[in-house]
């Protein structure tokens, strides 16, 4: 009996510890990360070059060279050192009169691609959080059922089996919740890493503007 009650108490404390710390405002309800939620990265946050206008946006989508390079720069498998070299090579290949437009278009492409990836990741994080909340509610229900089962003073064999089953279920649910919560900590870093990446690429592209 004592062992079982300690299990319940210990798990109850653990569930509180494993619940995400919500640093966001009420408007960002469902965002579990301590990192601030920035839904969309804007050019004004990191770009000091010419305006990212419709001409630049259209160019990166229609020009095969700009499009291919933007895709390569946005990919995290491309190191920032490699990105710097690719940007320098492209800037040297473009005529001076076209350079600013082409480089602005290149930045616009990288920004659009990274924004799309970030939004997918953030949507996945919020979906993950909803599942965690549902699991936390299920844990509370199982814990309540176990407490009720333990109130039986002289349990029969079926009641003892129910206790064991509930103990096992509670332990299993709590372990899953804990493991998922640890994974979420790493996933939450992804949007910030992408934000840092596009900022670094923007700075590298801007270094080659006329």
Image (spheres, grey):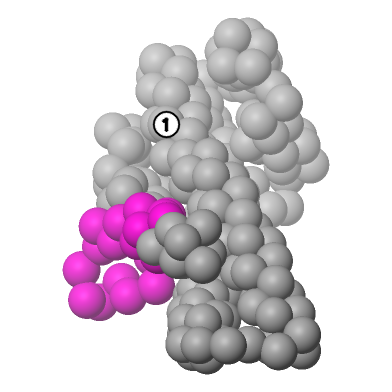
Magenta-drawn segment: 10-32
Task: Classify the position of the C terminus by image quarter.
Answer: top left
Q: Residue at x 69, y 22 (%)?
A: 78
Q: Is residue 95 left or right of residue 50?
A: right
Q: Is residue 53 above or below residue 195?
A: below
Which one is nearer the viewer's eye here, 42 or 57?
Answer: 42
Q: Quadrant of residue 162?
A: bottom right
Looking at the picture, how far across and down is residue 201, in whole percent? 49, 26
Residue at point 53%, 45% (across, down): 182
Percent coordinates x, y for residue 109 in the rendering = 59, 45
Residue 173 seen in the figure: no
104 and 147: which is toward the camera: 147
Who's the residue at 48% across and 34% down the image? Answer: 193
Residue 89 x/y as whole percent: 66, 11
Q: 51 or 168: nearer the eye?
A: 168
- Left or right: where does residue 157 sit relative to residue 179? right
Residue at left 68%, top 53%? 61
Badge 1: residue crowd in 10 Å (few <14, some 14–19, many ≥20): few
Relative to residue 42, is residue 105 depicted above or below? above
Asked if residue 15 is positioned above or below residue 158 in the image, the reply reads above
- Helix, strand, or loop for circle 1? helix
Left or right of 11? Residue 167 is right
How many marks the image carries: the answer is 1
Q: Is residue 11 magenta?
A: yes
Q: What residue would you read off at disc 1?
A: 196
45 left or right, relative to 54: left
Residue 62 seen anywhere in this rendered image of the structure: yes
Residue 40 counted in the magenta span? no
Q: Position of residue 206 (x, y in %)?
A: 40, 23
């Amino acid at each position: 009996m004592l062992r079982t009650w300690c299990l319940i108490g210990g798990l109850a404390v653990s569930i509180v510890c494993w619940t995400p710390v919500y640093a966001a405002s009420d408007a960002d309800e469902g965002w579990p990360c301590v990192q601030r939620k920035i839904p969309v990265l804007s050019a004004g946050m990191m770009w000091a070059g010419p305006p990212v206008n419709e001409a630049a946006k259209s160019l990166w989508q229609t020009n095969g060279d700009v499009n291919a390079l933007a895709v390569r720069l946005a990919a995290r498998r491309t190191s920032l050192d490699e990105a710097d070299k690719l940007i320098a090579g492209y800037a040297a290949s473009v005529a001076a009169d076209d350079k600013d437009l082409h480089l602005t278009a290149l930045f616009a492409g990288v920004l659009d691609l990274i924004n799309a990836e970030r939004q997918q990741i953030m949507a996945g994080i919020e979906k993950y959080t909803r599942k965690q909340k549902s699991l936390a509610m299920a844990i509370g229900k199982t814990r309540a059922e176990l407490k009720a089962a333990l109130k039986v003073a002289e349990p029969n064999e079926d009641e003892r089996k129910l206790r064991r089953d509930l103990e096992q279920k509670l332990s299993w649910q709590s372990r899953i919740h804990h493991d998922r919560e640890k994974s979420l900590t790493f996933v939450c870093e992804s949007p910030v890493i992408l934000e840092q990446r596009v900022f670094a690429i923007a700075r590298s592209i801007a270094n080659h503007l006329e």
